[in-house]
Amino acid sequence: MPLHRLKDFYPNYRETLADGQMDKITSYSVYAQGNDKVGSAKDLLVDDAGYFRYLVVDTGPWIFGKNVLLPIGLARFDYDQTCVYVDGLSKQQVEHLPEYDDDMVVDEHYEERVRGVYQPMAQGRSSRQFLGNTYAPASSTARSGEVAGDLRRMQALGERETALSGTHRTATHPDRPQQGTSIYDRETGYYGLSAADNHGLLRSYEDRLAGRHNRS
């Protein structure tokens, strides 16, 4: 599924969607464990339906000056302080993230490299209460040999989508019927929005963005 920069997908989002919060996304500082600053938020990537998938982080002078991606579910927001925290992430892990370029196509191979770095954090979210959905660890629901968030033991993307084809409700958006499922809906540890991470406001923006896109 293609990903789009928010400002390209919905150019007027600051005037019609932000409500004084989302328009400040480029002023958010990003912190790893130990309150180590690792960069600043630069943009958001959304899928074709308008759902947030990644925060684009500019590591600036803190780490090599490259842009990297942060799965939206792993970002803990402090809206009042315009800060994003990534619990359990080290500065060294950020250094090993693949570089993101505004003109590049984010394909499956690239995303697997990104998720591989964040894997320990994603696995740690398996017991969280996600907005609109209680996420059960895959050991109790998935097919034998597949563990949520563990890329080494999960089926290939195409195989998962084929095996799970058929109309059903997705994990991260249970109110949205969908044919088949995407990697984002399967890997809730990376992309699921939770109240514990202060994602309520973000989810409301997401729903409004998706709603506006569907009406366009």
Image: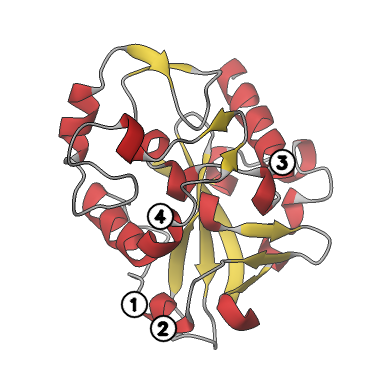
Q: Label 4, label 2: how many angstroms apart (C-alpha)?
A: 19 Å
Residue 19 falls left or right of residue 75: right
| Above-or-below relation of 41 to 128 | below
In front: mark 4 or mark 2? 4
In front: mark 1 or mark 3? 3
| Above-or-below relation of 61 to 173 | below
Q: Amino acid at mark 2?
A: Gln
What residue is rendered at 30% in x and 62% in y? Answer: 116
Residue closer to the observer: 124 or 5: 124
Mark 1 lies on a secondary structure that is loop
**Residue where numbered disc 4 is placed:** 123
Circle on res. 96: 1
Residue closer to the observer: 105 or 181: 181
Circle on res. 125: none
Where residue 62 appears, x then y in whole percent?
Answer: 54, 87
Label 2: how many residues lie within 10 Å, few (<14), some (14-19) or many (20+)? few
**Residue where numbered disc 3 is placed:** 200
